[in-house]
Amino acid sequence: MTALRKLLAAVLAIVSLAFATPAAAGGEPGKCTGSFVNPITDICWSCLFPISIGALDIWPSSRPDPDNPDLPLCLCGIRPGIAMGFWEPVRLADVSMKPWCFVNLGGTKLDPGFDIGFRSISGPSAIGGASQYYSSWHVHWYAYPLIYWMEIVADFLCLEPGSIDILYISEIDPLWQDSELTAIINPEAVLFANPLALAACAADCAASTANLPLDEMFWCAGCQGSMYPMNGNVSASIGHVQASRLVLSRFAYKLHRELVSWGTMGSAGLCGKYLMPVMRKQQYRFQMTNPNPATSGRYACPPIGASTTLQEPGQVIPAIGEDMGYLVWRKRNCCAL
């Protein structure tokens, strides 16, 4: 972790040289909170399952799982193999309204030396008889191939290799700050900015809570709201868990739209990753790691869009509990040797 802190400090030092504007005094939000993720006790290890060969679950689970290839045998070029399906923890994410707050790095807050990314949540206001809440969040995205670097499974080519690293900091991304600029990567948002499209998301909410989200309704984030705009501005925050999960879903979608993240599930993923500019929601599960790790139970790692009603209690500390951390699980289908 010391090496990771040094790497982060070096990145911020380089970035700060490009910005001459000093940080505004007194403009910094509250204290950053969080804790380091214990790779043993803070992980929901049952979220690895089910594990399948073809359409057969060799290690079944009560957790919902998308369809796997029907045949147990596969062929990649001239190389035959076994069509396996499993869930892999591959990313960590900080989701916080406090800029430069690294929740999963022990609640470390850095001063980059320039005034950028400062946002806050607003209280309720009566407009037309309706109470409205607005919040704006930042995301930090880490490489976290847990199974690989812990060497739980050796010599398994289907696992994503690598070590812990910081991949993305939203504070320095202009597309994450401004909804008008965000339209560059999601111009289709204008087609779904209407009451009918939003009302249809109720079906996705029910489906994702009961089983799996509806990939056909790509503009919906289930019970959390709309996938658009693909940034951290949430116009209707019901709670911190709801809003942070919505922002994380949007961020994952944004990475797919920018061709940074690719598809790994289904028959198309047996021989390698493939382009997926319209993200399939069924590919991901989000497990909370901060402030309180969710390590067991039906909703420890729910799919995108599932109701957060049972996850909200005990996850927010008044005045300081706006910092959330998540472990991202990704569905993988692979033609294993």
Image (cartoon, rainbow, N blue to C red):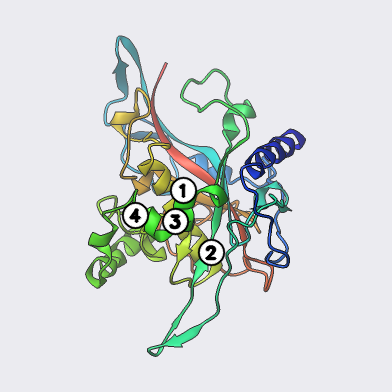
Describe residue 72's horizontal placement relative to residue 86 as left or right: left
Residue 285: assigned label: 1
Mark pair 3, 4: CA separation: 10 Å
Q: Secondary structure at mark 1?
A: strand
Q: Secondary structure at mark 3?
A: loop
Residue 70 in percent (x, y) is at: 26, 31
Q: Quadrant of residue 69?
A: top left
Specify the amino acid type for callout 1.
Arg
For disc 2, the marked residue is 241
For disc 4, the marked residue is 183
Mark nearer the viewer, 1 or 4: 4
Label 1 Cα crowd, 10 Å radius (few <14 / some 14-19 / many 20+): many
Q: Residue at x 49, y 69 (%)?
A: 309
Instruction: Pick whichever of labels 1 and 4 is earlier in the sequence.
Output: 4
Instruction: Assess whether mark 2 and mark 3 are in contact (beta carbons under 8 angstroms).
Output: no
Instruction: Pick whichever of labels 3 and 2 is earlier in the sequence.
Output: 3
The residue most toward the right is 2
Mark pair 1, 4: CA separation: 26 Å
For disc 3, the marked residue is 231
Q: Secondary structure at mark 2?
A: helix
Mark pair 3, 2: CA separation: 17 Å
Instruction: Pick whichever of labels 2 and 1 is earlier in the sequence.
Output: 2
The residue most toward the front is 20
Residue 202 in percent (x, y) is at: 30, 67
Specify the amino acid type for callout 3.
Asn
